[in-house]
Image (spheres, grey):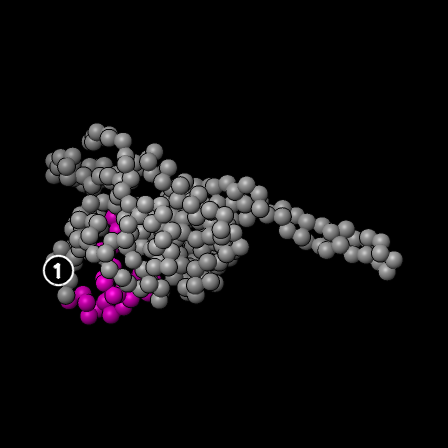
Amino acid sequence: MGTPFISLLEPTKLDGYDRGKPHDQQPASIPRVFMDAMEVRESVFVREQSVPLEFEHDGDDARSLHWVVYASVNQVVAQERRDAAGNVVQPRRSSTRTQPIGTVRLVPFPHPPHPERGGRYVDNLLQNEAELASSLTASQEARVSAAQPYGRDRPTTLHDGLEPYVKIGRLAVVKEFRGHRIAGQLWAAARAWLENNQDYFNPSVQELGLDALKAGVNDVPRWNGLVGVHAQEDVVPVWERWGFQVDEGMGRWWEEGIPHVGMFLRLKLKDKPITIS
């Protein structure tokens, strides 16, 4: 394996992406980096973990940032052949391919409400949701239905239910390349980007329509370094090594049959004044 390098794709339209088809059957208009991210995700989540292909691509992909790590991989395309006398009649031939081997995405706020304790989710939908809908509080219903759901969420141990946070997810490294700290490189790239672009996702007053209400700076959601992850339970130690803490108050739930827990980390950001422009 050659020295890995990382590419970043910022939020972009993915119009025409057919979530029922694999990455290599998508329209040519889909950005190459996203196709490579899906190649990795299909390898890990679909083939290894048996997540249905049609559930792997979701509505957050178009509004997220995606990092993909690549490696130059040398592959044998023809074996050496010798004649009866032992003479080489066909030398071994190899080729080098730049292969995507890992990916991660960063989803900006807002997010849906925190998962229900013990809930079972399929394609991001809570099963028996119709039965639970009648038990939602007024604030939960408002958050689910609002175009910009910045309303209060269920408070947990590490999240007050109101503060905007960004979410890291879809972290995957293909099986053959694990054990080389690829996942750590991906998180390091995302973390460095967040620390250098802390205002990237902060909406303006005009975007939220608050200017007509003569709202002040305190009414504008502002990201203050809080990063969340819905972690598969068996990789919690990996996230803990990077400084994330399990949010005990969020509880445990299942996504596509896989147990998950919530975790949070707060990055230290440089103080910057809030401006209305």
Residue bounds of the magenta highlight: 109-134
| Image position, residue 20 (x, y; %) | 43, 62
Does the stretch in magenta take in 121?
A: yes
Seen at 31% across and 51% down, the residue is 229
Q: Quadrant of residue 134?
A: bottom left
Work out whether residue 38 or residue 173 is closer to the camera in this orientation and state it.
Answer: 173
| Image position, residue 173 (x, y; %) | 46, 52
Looking at the image, residue 87 lies above or below residue 215: below
Seen at 16% across and 58% down, the residue is 141
Q: Is residue 153 visible?
A: no
Does the stretch in magenta take in 61?
A: no
Relative to residue 129, is residue 16 drawn left or right?
right
Crowd tier of the residue under label 1, counting other residues whose Cα lies within 10 Å: few below 14, some 14–19, many 20 or above: few
Relative to residue 92, is residue 56 drawn left or right?
left
| Image position, residue 41 (x, y; %) | 45, 55
Quarter of the C terminus within the rendering = top left
Dominant secondary structure of the magenta stretch?
loop
Q: Which residue is mark 1?
A: 137
| Image position, residue 62 (x, y; %) | 37, 49
Q: Is residue 74 visible?
A: yes
| Residue type of the residue flagged with mark 1 | Thr
Relative to residue 258, is residue 150 drawn left or right?
left
